[in-house]
Structures are given as C-alpha cells and as structure tokens.
C-alpha cells in the first residue's frame, strides 16, 4: 500500500480509504481513478477478502447497500404494474445474497425538505420508479453512489431499463385496425406526452378517435368504471375501447356488464401492461404485455455490475413488448 501511495503522490491513509470505499471520503475523481488504476496495474490484493480483483473492484456483499424508491407519492406500492418489477429486483438480489431496502417517495421528499440523510450510511445504489422531481433526484445523488431508473423519466448519468411507453400503445392500435375497427374509444391516463404520441400515431395509420368516448381516467379502476358508466347511460357505446392500462380497461369492462352489455359481443376492449388480474377478469383481457419482471432483473444486474466494477457510463436498455390476444376482442362484423 505504501508503494502505491508513493507512486500516486498521496498518503497511505488516502489509499486505504479508497480501497475500503469509505463513504465519507471526498477527493477528486481523477485522484481516485489514478489510485485505482495503480492498484489494478500492480495487481494489489488487500487482505480483507481480496476485495480488489484484477478485473474490477468488488465490495463484500454484506457491505453493499441497495434500495429502491417507490412511485409518485404513494404511501405504499399499490400499482400492480410495479409489483412484478419489484419481484424481479428482489429475486436477483436474493439469489446473489444481497439485501435491499425500500423507501416511499413521500418519505424521501420529507427527508429532503428536512435536509436529513436518507440513512446513516450512503447507499451504493438506488433504483427509482416513475418520474421523480429534479430536486429529489439531486438529493438522491447525494444519498447513493449510483442511481438507476425504471419506467419513468430517464435520469442523466443513471442506468435506465424499461419499455418505450410512447410506442407500446401502438400495438393496441395496430391490433384494433387489424380486427377491422377504424374508430377507437380511448381511456387515457395522466401522461400528456404519452397521450400526444398516441394521438399522432393514430392519425398516421388512418384510424380516428371516437370523440364521444375519449377521456382521462387518472390511471385507476374506479375513475374508468364511473366515467364509462356515465357514457353508457348516455347511450354512448363505442365498437372498441383501448385503455392505457389494464386497471382502467377492467374498470370499463365491469361498467359494460353492469349496463347490460357484453364483451366482446357489444364492445371489444384492449388493455395495456398484462397485470395478473387481466387474465382472470370477467372476460380475459386482450392486452399489451410489458415484461416487468425482466425489467426488474435487468436493472438489478446492471446496478450490481456498476457497483462492483465501477462502470463510469450509464446504460439504456429498452425491453420489447408483445400483444396478448385473449377473449375481450373479436373481429368487427361487416354488413353487406
């Protein structure tokens, strides 16, 4: 260690703190890199479980601290879309014997406002769900060495794993057109950019929107159910409904049945996400499948790789999706 310190023009204490990945250490990145490069070049192996390897710089598993921050102000994760992502994250970490902490975004916001640390020790990595305000992202950068994100807005310098949410609804539009429908009823969420992208695509493929049945339902079952009931009671029944998530699609489906109509005989319905509930709704729901568990596994793998080998650049991975055909849709009947 003394030889490395002399070669780099730093103190032995500084080399020791870099080797041990001291979270309180504040030194220039170029100094840290110079020391690590010298360690690698000389194949220096410290005594504590050979933490530094010739091909990387690995911490003991018991010392690695990883957490995830849940979605958009919820006091607990209730969105079934994220359940499978979390399952993928925790499965990978459990398989490799890492522990994981969970935080809710409202608790993170409170800690930020109080200017308090999220934990006594800095995290090696944090995985963020959904769109997180820039002020909170800045705060979390101080709480973790590396950030990763899934689903929401991409964060500069952070790994991102997800599906292209501006493109995935196109699968539903294409399938509706294939079935012979040229006018779509739409149940939208609360993402204006995603809505705008969908509208542009609809216009580009020669399909129109049923203006009498097009509304935003805030991404939840209850709102979609209530608003669909209002439309149906007013005599407005589209030939097909495309919803931006499965919860809203199932809410619309239940309203259709409550009003005495049938799916798909009177109206076809397509959802998005392929949550578990979609396969055993009143009529199994045709939907766009997002490979959520795989997203969770990938983001965990990438984060561990970045922690253990100090990858300096961020990685962006887009996971493909697929249309799942079930019994809530049928081909449009044509009249002679």
Image: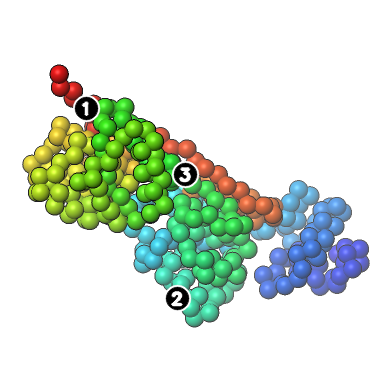
Of labels 3 and 1, earlier in sequence is 3
Between marks 1 and 2 in the image, the one whose residue lies nearer the viewer: 1
Name above or below for residue 121 compared with residue 288. below
Q: Residue at x 23, y 52 (%)?
A: 224
Question: In what element is the residue under mark 1?
Answer: loop
Which residue, given by chain and number where applicable, does mark 1 sit on? 332
* Res 20 visible: yes
Looking at the rendered image, the disc whose residue lies closer to the viewer, 3 or 1, is 1
Evaluate if marks 2 and 3 touch, with contact meaning CB atoms under 8 Å apart.
no
Return the residue at label 3: 164
Count numbered badges in the picture: 3
Please rate how many residues cluster around mark 2, counting C-alpha atoms within 10 Å: few if below 14, some from 14 to 19, many from 20. Answer: few
Residue 83 visible within the image: no
Among numbered discs 1 and 2, the one appearing first in the sequence:
2
Which residue is tagged 2? 110
Residue 241, x across and y down, in percent: 24, 40
Q: Nearer the viewer, residue 334 or 292?
A: 334
In what element is the residue under mark 3?
loop
The residue sitting at the top extreme is 336
How much space separates mark 1 and mark 2, taking CA atoms?
52 Å
Residue placed at 72% from the left, 72% from the top? 26
User: Is 27 left or right of 136, judged from the image as shown?
Assistant: right
Nearer the observer, disc 2 or disc 3?
3
Q: Quadrant of residue 121?
A: bottom right
Distance Cα–Cα, label 2 vs label 3: 31 Å
Q: How is the image coloured?
A: rainbow
Element type where label 2 sits in the image: helix
- Whether residue 220 sits left or right of residue 118 in the image: it is left
Q: Which mark is residue 199?
A: none
- Taking 107 as reference, is 161 above or below it? above
């Amino acid at each position: 260690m003394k030889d490395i310190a002399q070669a780099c023009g730093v103190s032995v204490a500084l080399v020791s703190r870099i080797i041990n990945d001291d979270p309180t250490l504040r030194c220039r990145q170029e100094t840290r890199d110079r020391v690590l490069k010298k360690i690698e070049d000389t194949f220096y192996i410290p005594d504590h479980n050979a933490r530094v390897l010739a091909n990387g710089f690995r911490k003991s598993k018991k010392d690695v601290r990883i957490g995830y921050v849940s979605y958009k102000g919820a006091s607990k994760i209730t969105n079934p879309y994220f359940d499978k992502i979390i399952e993928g994250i925790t499965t990978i970490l459990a398989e490799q014997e890492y522990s994981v902490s969970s935080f809710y975004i409202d608790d993170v916001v409170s800690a930020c406002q109080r200017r308090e640390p999220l934990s006594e020790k800095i995290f090696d990595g944090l995985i963020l769900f959904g769109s997180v305000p820039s002020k909170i992202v800045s705060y979390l950068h101080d709480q973790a060495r590396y950030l990763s994100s899934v689903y929401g807005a991409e964060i500069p310098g952070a790994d991102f794993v997800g599906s292209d949410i501006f493109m995935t609804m196109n699968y539903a539009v294409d399938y509706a057109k294939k079935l012979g429908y040229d006018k779509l009823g739409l149940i939208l969420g609360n993402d204006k950019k995603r809505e705008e992208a969908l509208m542009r695509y609809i216009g580009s493929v020669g399909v129109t929107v049923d203006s009498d049945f097009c509304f935003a339902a805030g991404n939840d079952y209850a709102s979609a159910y209530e608003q669909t009931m209002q439309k149906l009671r007013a005599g407005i029944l589209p030939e097909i409904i495309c919803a931006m998530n499965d919860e809203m699609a199932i809410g619309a489906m239940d309203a259709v049945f409550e009003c005495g109509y049938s799916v798909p005989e009177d109206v076809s319905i397509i959802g998005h996400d392929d949550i578990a509930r979609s396969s055993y709704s009143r009529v199994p729901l045709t939907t766009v499948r997002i490979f959520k568990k795989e997203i969770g596994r990938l983001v965990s793998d990438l984060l561990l790789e970045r922690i253990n080998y100090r990858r300096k650049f961020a990685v962006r991975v887009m996971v493909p999706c697929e249309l799942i055909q079930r019994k809530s849709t049928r081909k449009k009947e044509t009249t002679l």
